[in-house]
Amino acid sequence: MKKGKNHYEGSLEKFLTTKIYLNIKHLKKGVYEIRIIHNNKVIKTIQFIYQ
């Protein structure tokens, strides 16, 4: 049985700062992709490897 990808989505009312932090302590080892979306369009895609 093939395991599907997890999809997480959330929203915030207003940012209090211009910095965004991502805590990756509990991620499994592998390649991850972050997509930044504005007005339903991807404006930036970032990939990183967690080892």
Image (tube, helix red, strand yellow):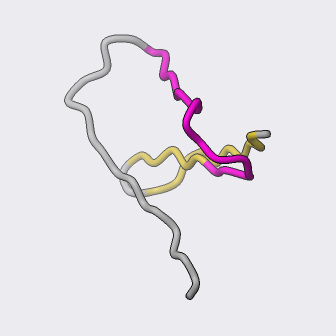
Query: Residue 8 colored magenta?
Result: no
What residue is shown at x 52% (from left), y 54% (from top)?
42
The quarter of the rendered structure image containing the N terminus is bottom right
Query: Which of the pair 21/36 is nearer the observer?
Result: 21
What residue is shown at x 64% (from left), y 48% (from top)?
45
The quarter of the rendered structure image containing the C terminus is top right
Magenta span: predominant SS is loop
In the picture, measured across the screen, residue 21 lies left or right of residue 45, that is left
Residue lying at the far left of the rendered structure: 13
Query: Which of the pair 37/7 is nearer the observer?
Result: 7
User: What count of labels does the image hold?
Assistant: 0
User: At which x and y percent is residue 18?
Assistant: 45, 15
Query: Residue 21 colored magenta?
Result: yes
Residue lying at the far top of the rendered structure: 17
User: At which x and y percent is residue 9?
Assistant: 35, 51
What residue is shown at x 46% (from left), y 56% (from top)?
41
Compared with 19, 26 (above or below) is below
Compared with 20, 2 (above or below) is below
Magenta stretch, residue numbers: 18-33
In the picture, measured across the screen, residue 22 lies left or right of residue 38, that is right
Compared with 16, 31 (above or below) is below
Tell me which corner region of the image, top left, top right, bottom left or bottom right, holds residue 16: top left
Query: Which of the pair 26/32 is nearer the observer?
Result: 26
